[in-house]
Image (tube, rainbow, N blue to C red):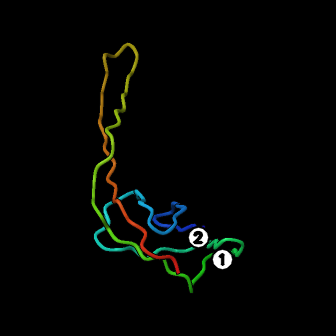
Amino acid sequence: MKYAIIRLNDRQYKVSEGDLVLVDGFIKESPEFEVLMVVDGEKVEIGQPILSKVKVKTKVLSEEKGEKIYVSKYKAKSRYRKRIGFRSQNTKLQVEKIG
């Protein structure tokens, strides 16, 4: 099984060919990844810190919002209560080729 460890926006993802990956933030076109490690069966390549010769080709499928998260603020004895909602913005990518 061939897979790679990539870094995008200070987060690391383990991807293999044909995978669907949900990454943070809206991305308009296929991003350039920093490939940190590639495993192909018994063969392992580890970057120092990145592998410049290996590319991961992806395709942007959709942009979507995540599940809503509520944050509450409260201060005792002052009748202060506040509730704020937040939805993260995500991009769904499909990994086409590692190589």
Q: Residue at x 61, y 73 (%)?
A: 38
Residue at the top extreme, as displayed: 77
Figure check: 23 above or below 99: above
Q: Nearer the viewer, residue 35 or 19?
A: 19
Where residue 79 appears, as percent x and y from the top left, is: 31, 16
Q: Residue at x 44, y 66 (%)?
A: 18
Mark 1, residue position: 47
**Few, some or many residues within 10 Å of mark 1 (<14, 14–19, 20+):** few
**Few, some or many residues within 10 Å of mark 2 (<14, 14–19, 20+):** some
Quarter of the view holding residue 14: bottom right
Q: For the N terminus, give its image quadrant.
A: bottom right
The reply, left or right, for residue 39 in relation to residue 63 is right
Where residue 45 appears, as percent x and y from the top left, is: 68, 77
The reply, left or right, for residue 53 in relation to residue 26 is right
Query: Secondary structure beneath disc 1?
Result: strand
Quarter of the view holding residue 95: bottom left
Q: Which mark is residue 34?
A: none
Mark 2, residue position: 2
Report how far apart the C-alphas of labels 2 and 1 lie in the structure: 16 Å
Q: Residue at x 32, y 68 (%)?
A: 60
Q: Are marks 2 and 1 in contact (CB under 8 Å)?
A: no
The reply, left or right, for residue 14 in relation to residue 25 is right
Query: Secondary structure beneath disc 2?
Result: strand
Where residue 54 appears, as percent x and y from the top left, is: 55, 82
Quarter of the view holding residue 30: bottom left
Where residue 13 appears, as percent x and y from the top left, is: 52, 61
What's the amino acid at mark 1?
Gly
Q: Earlier in the sequence, mark 2 or mark 1?
A: 2
